[in-house]
Image (cartoon, rainbow, N blue to C red):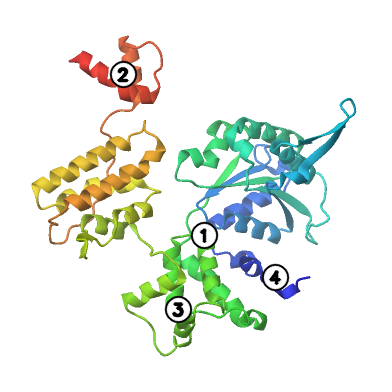
Amino acid sequence: MLRKGKEESSDLLRQFEPAKEADLAIHVKKVEEIKHWLEAALQDSEYEPEGIAKQILLVTGPSGSGKSVCVKTIAKQLKCDVKEWTTPVDLELFYEDNFDFESREDRRSRQSQKQLFNDFLHKSSRYCSLFSSPGTERKVLLVKDFPNSFLRSPEEFHESLEIYQNQSSTPIIFIATDASSKSLDIAMKLFPPAIMENFHVDTIKFNTVSVTLMKKAIKRISTLIGGSAELRKTFQVPPKAVEEDIVASSQGDLRNCCLNYLFTCLKSIPSSLAHQSAGSKTKKPTDKGSTNRHKGALGLSEGLTVMHGLGRILHPKYVNNDIGTRFLHAPEDITDSFISQPAAIISLLHSNYVSRCSDVHCLSSASDCLAVADVIMNEYRSDQLASYGLNLAVRGIMVNNQQTAHGWHQIKKKVSIQLQNSAQLYTDELTKLGIITRPIPQKMFASEYRGLISIIRR
């Protein structure tokens, strides 16, 4: 049997969870929105202005923005018990034994994920739990791990949601993490505009956590470590330079920031970091090399902002080795840093690459690469090609910008460039002219019909 101290230290973040609203490192406005919605949802529907009770809430935002922690902390402050759904992984536990008397054999069947989810909604909204926190008077349901069957067929989820709304009045909160691809966006799949309107679903969107709030979270953790003799046996506070490196590399991900900081605070860190921590009072690293060494020892990636990324693309640097001349910053690494916003980066390159090229031939080659990237990024293409389009644009400008223009050039804002109308506009136009009489798939229209029609018009 494990001792209590070791059992508590098995989860790093659980020991430092926020206990009250003031401990949350989240924007005050978002905390107030969650609090006001919970207070209104826990009241009767007769207090609502239109007689419609606030029952369903959708919380969206990037990963690590503090969505679930904010909901649980505010609910705890309001003396409300949170019942969270967890998708079962070991389905052997949910097999039902059915003996077939005719064939004299055991037949085992299992409940579907939809049935298990419906049972959770039905039982959790009606019955009290033996494991509820003492002093809680009300309850709210929390769902952030959606069953896989709902992602394959959203209609099943909508049926479960309709049954729950008709049979229960307990508030329920759904948490969906933003995704760069539309095919992976849970909020867009399960909560289209029609469902949001029919079920009166309220929505609150979280943003990435600012640097100031991440420093607040780190300061709170260091204060707890310094004020507890038990925690000081396991953790030690690292120097300020390491803290700043962790905040810079997190890029708005609060969970990642706290985990990296706690791993750094563990006394089992490498000896090089421990030596730096011990000598931090007498010597503070100020040069760029020391910062990079800290990041390498911690296993952190360097935070690349948009301005730094544009500088590496528009003003590429080279290194000479035995193989030959190569880029100091690989185009693939730059592409991976901005894979979540390829269209915005390509638009910024459109606005700024002309003034950075001093040779007209290089400018022409870079323009050709951007033109091909625009074709790949066009709206009828698959989302999986976005990384290839961004990689082509980045590599095309870096390779062809052999003679970078000198002097200071201001970064211009991105512009909206649409080289051609959408396929739907062309389809409507050709339908009016009588050229086509039935809808055409977008990919077929882009690859075949449009080219043939342009030849006919000539």
Q: Which of pointers 1 and 4 lies earlier in the amino acid sequence?
A: 4
Q: Position of residue 222 (x, y in %)?
A: 56, 77
Q: Amino acid at mark 4?
A: Glu
Rate crowding at label 2 as few (under 14), some (14 to 19) or many (20 or more) other CA atoms within 10 Å: some
Nearer to me, 21 or 287: 287
Q: Amino acid at mark 1?
A: His
The residue wearing badge 4 is 8
CA gap, disc 2 and disc 3: 62 Å
Q: Which of pointers 4 and 2 lies earlier in the amino acid sequence?
A: 4
Q: Position of residue 200 (x, y in %)?
A: 62, 36
CA gap, disc 3 and disc 1: 24 Å
CA gap, disc 1 and disc 4: 29 Å
Tell whether 428 sits left or right of 170.
Answer: left
> Furthest-bottom residue in view?
282
Q: Position of residue 359 (x, y in %)?
A: 9, 50
The residue wearing badge 3 is 240
> Which label was assigned to residue 449?
2
Q: Secondary structure at mark 4?
A: helix
The residue wearing badge 1 is 27
CA gap, disc 4 and disc 3: 27 Å
Q: Which of pointers 3 and 1 lies earlier in the amino acid sequence?
A: 1
CA gap, disc 2 and disc 1: 51 Å
Q: Are marks 3 and 1 in contact (CB under 8 Å)?
A: no
